[in-house]
Image (cartoon, grey):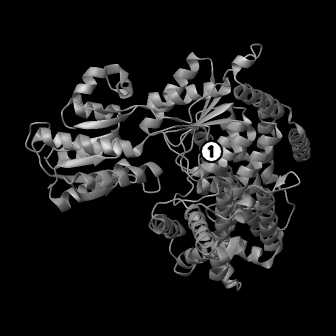
Amino acid sequence: MKKLWKKMVLVLVVVLGVSMLAGCGNNAGEEKQKDTQKDTQEVGNKGNQDDPETEPKSLTRLGLAIPSTALFFEAEANQAKKFCDENGIELITVIADNDATKQHDQIEDLISKGCEAIVIVQVDKDAILSSLESCKEAGVYTICCGRQPADMTNCDVFVSANNEKMCEMAVESMLEGADVAGIDKLKVVEFVGKLSDQNAVERDDYFKQYAEASGRIEIVAEVASEWNQDTAYSRFSDVYNSLNGDFNAIYLPADSYITAAASVLQENNDWGSEGEENYRIITGIDGSSTAYQYIMDGYMYSTINSDAHEFINASINAAMSLVAGETCDDVVEPVLLTVRNQEIEEYGDKLYGIAYMDK
Amino acid sequence: MEKKQVKGKVFRVKEYPVLLAIAVLIILMSVFIPDFMTSRNITNLFIQMSIYGIAMVGLVFALIGGGIDLSLASNAMISSIMCATVMTKFPAAGAVGGIIVGMLVGAGIGALNGLIAAKFGVNPFIGTISMQLFLNGFGVVFTNGATLSGLPSSFTAIGKLKISVIPVVVIIMFVFYAVGHYVTRKTAFGRKLYAAGTNPEAARMVGIPVVKVRMLSFIICGFCASVAGMVSMAKLTAVSANPSSDLFLDTLCASIIGGASLSGGKGNIAGAAFGVLLLSLISNGVNLLGIDRNMTLVIKGIIILIAIILDLSKGKEKVKKIAAKKRSAESAV
């Protein structure tokens, strides 16, 4: 029995080896993929009008590489699926768990899978460059969504999430909130994301820059959240105790941290809505459903809405244009919007976060 | 007795289920995923394996010696950061200088782990998890959260170069496999390591320097982690203070699949290498099929559980056999 078992395994190993060797020689699929994209690029370069007989290519298989399952990225993934289903595009989504090496491997797999274009929300602006280069070599279009790579050479389209603009808008909105509440100087507790994350660094740097320029904002403490709710909660607890609650505003680089902030303030009986004595000006970034809820309840002043759905729609539209050989802007900037109570009432379902609210 | 235990064929009966699983998986993937059997994907698969394969070799050494290194991924990150710092801040040192510093840092961290676990007797779980926390924090402080890039092309070439059709990183992985296999199976150190991991007290009584041997296993683990980190950096052409989320778990999983035991004294490089291949195939298949990536975790969890249960049941069988032998010997007397 043991001998038979050994023989079986040996046969399988031989089959395995032979098939792998055969695989190494099988380039037919890849050649076809390259040829398709070469044709597409040629069509694109020439322009469709020159040759009426040339059929424009259409996007059939799209890759989406996102860094994590954070609410914003999940909203992007959901919208991508909806968009692709409606347009008959096969979508393959990979999630890197904030690991640049893993994202690199996943993008290589998407190229192997024959994706004609890949929408990338990168983990790291530098580490993504080698993946962009691989895509370029394989003739796969790349659309960098929301995060700009360190070098744009191999990125076909950048759908820009302008962190600087968001921070500027956040500061403006906080000051407006202060004016409404009759506060002259704002003592702000600033939540900070994980400092090895590009968005966290930019949302920290630009906020400080615009806050200082305003002359009315003093950052009295920072909460290093590490992009983690539990960490944010415990560190904000410490900050609250050390300041003895002496601050009148909170800046959140991602809306989801409102829950950690609210928990700490509630525990200290220092949680008030608009008009109450312990009301604080709280402004976040993202435009998530959680933030909308707190805004509607009067506890949060505003959020800077960078619409996840709009980002992904713009990215897939760009991918479709590129594959079809149409011209496309190198940089696409979805509209940013400061969302307060009145905007939620005005725009309603048009705001992406509304779709994720508990109705 | 010990000699008999560690000598043997490269493939042992223990590896056959893993080989079978690999073969079945390859056949299934070839049939159901048209893009699987392409030269690009097979090359990708092996390149992706290389980082895990190299790190696995070190972890198997630590596991055989009765230890474990939870700081493996953080060590890989810090070594790469140091390597990158040397290459970018001191260009005269070049890629070779950076690589040497990276290796020294990795081995040094391994030595510290060894000192904590083997010399001071701190449980390796606690010792190395403390090291992991320290390294993660230190990495962010040292780099100020920034990504280090602008590495010399002589270094980044390692991630791209091919000899004939085989990527250099894959060759590096196979060199580590070969050396690791040789050291564990054919050298006196390998035999001492198995002995120290199986029963440290008995090993000490027969004159094996258990502390030294176990320390060395941690140093090897740290060294391999540093090389894995630098290979990853060469691939990505950048590094940040963000340790790989999968490196430790996947290498541990592969080692256990390959027959290593958390209680020490067991494990072999060939088996663990097949473990790495199996896990890489699963990840590759999940990506190619576009399946929810959480399925990878589910599958890995199931595989580890099966491997541990098989290991435990084999251990029980062994104990029963020894007891039966003992009884028959006693009755004969």
* Front-most of residues A7 and B102: B102
* Front-most of residues A190 and A186: A186
The answer, for residue B177, to whether it is visible in the render is yes
Give the quarter of the figure containing the N terminus of chain B: bottom right
Classify A138 as above or below B256: above
A147 displayed left or right of A186 = right
Residue at 58% x, 73% y: name it.
B89
Q: In the rendered image, which residue does mark 1 sit on?
A: B300
For disc 1, the neighbor class at 10 Å (few under 14, some 14 to 19, many from 20) is many
Q: In the rendering, at what x and y percent does residue B78 appear?
A: 56, 67
Classify B281 as above or below A211: above
Question: Mark 1 — on which chain does it sit?
Answer: B
Q: In the rendering, at what x and y percent does residue B285 appear?
A: 70, 37
Classify A103 as above or below B318: above
Q: Image quarter for residue B153?
A: bottom right
Q: How many marks?
A: 1
Residue at 27% x, 25% y: name it.
A344
Give the quarter of the figure containing the C terminus of chain B: bottom right
Residue, far bottom: B207
* Front-most of residues A47 and B95: A47
Q: Please, what secondary structure does the residue beneath circle 1 have?
A: helix
Residue at 42% x, 42% y: name it.
A162
The answer, for residue B63, to whether it is visible in the render is no
Q: In the rendering, at what x and y percent does residue B207 appear?
A: 70, 86
A78 displayed left or right of A19 = left
Q: In the rendering, at what x and y percent does residue A16 appear?
A: 86, 42
Residue, far top: A53
Residue at 38% x, 49% y: name it.
A203
Which amino acid type is shown beneath numbered disc 1? Answer: Lys
